[in-house]
Image (spheres, rainbow, N blue to C red):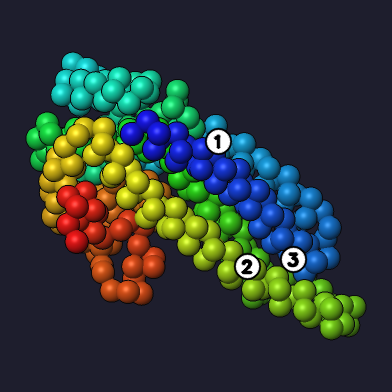
Amino acid sequence: MTSNIYKEADKNILRTWFFCAFFIALVSALGYAIAWWYQNPGILIIAFIFAIFMNVFSYWFSDKIVLKMHRATPATREANFDLWNITENLAITAGLPMPKLYIVEDSAPNAFATGRNKNHAVICVTTGLLAILNKEELEGVIAHEMSHIGNKDMLLGTLVVVMAGFVTLLSHMFLRGQMFGNVRRNDREGGDAGAILMVIGIVLAILSPIIATLIQLAISRKREFLADADGALLTRYPEGLASALRKISASAQPMRTANAADAHLFISNPFGPQGRTMNAVQKLFMTHPPVEERIRALLGHD
């Protein structure tokens, strides 16, 4: 497992740098289009500075934002003895620092990992998860989340939460401004080039949130299979995680705090059955691979 973790960690460092650079370029392109539309070059400068700020802010504070969003509270060894011991033992086995543990009071079974690096990692589980899983199944889930930490998945996934949301917000601001014709540029000044820039700006504003969402989903689906595989190697008991996934997917309850921005962080779609549809078009926009595919991969079934 160690070689797998190091390999995926290196890849995710590169992906994180690429995503941060892509985010700055995308926001700058949107800022340029909006600056041209409103004849205000200062907008481009503000967009670029804000993109840099969002990268830094996301790195340091996105995990805290996610925990606040779900009203998570710290776990203790006394109150959550099995969870604490399982996590501690798996951390030792994986050669990782013991992550902080948090609990979400929610009857829907689920879990996620967040944090900017292995020394500031957090694993969060719901009370519903603790209620329905036995020790082997809970160990499988924690090993899955521990693999996300070792692979540095959680930094990339948590950055996406803040950045994708900001791109969507900026795009909506441009579209609303264009729709209502606020301080529109004089078309005669721009000529054909101006018309082209206007079209590019509108297309960027429409496509940016879609691009951000597709990046989010593509990262999520691939990393879930990898975390399943590495988690199974860590416990040497893939049946535990497979059984946990069956129980989690059988739950009919969505999480009370479920939202689209961070759905990709969870081990299972937090929206419940309505978020687990399986037709070909919907699969493109699913935050997680179908549970049946994950179980088949874990157990080696064709």
The label nearer to you, 1 versus 2, is 1
Identify which residue is drawn at 49% across, 32% down. Answer: 116
Q: Which residue matches tag 1?
A: 59
Identify which residue is drawn at 82% across, 77% down. Answer: 194
- In the image, 130 versus 150, the foreground residue is 150
In this rendering, would 6 be left or right of 269? right
Residue 251 visible within the image: no
Q: Secondary structure at mark 3?
A: helix
Q: Which mark is residue 33?
A: 3
Residue 150 image point, x, y percent? 40, 32
The label nearer to you, 1 versus 3, is 1
- In the image, 14 versus 259, the foreground residue is 14
Identify which residue is drawn at 54% across, 63% down. Answer: 211
Which part of the image, by quadrant, shows the N terminus? top left
Residue 145 image point, x, y percent? 31, 37
Whether the residues at callouts 2 and 3 have beta carbons within 8 Å, the answer is yes
Residue 172 image point, x, y percent? 58, 64
Label 1 vs label 2: CA separation? 25 Å
Identify which residue is drawn at 30% across, 19% down. Answer: 92
Q: Which residue matches tag 2?
A: 205
Q: Looking at the image, is mark 1 or mark 2 earlier in the sequence?
A: 1
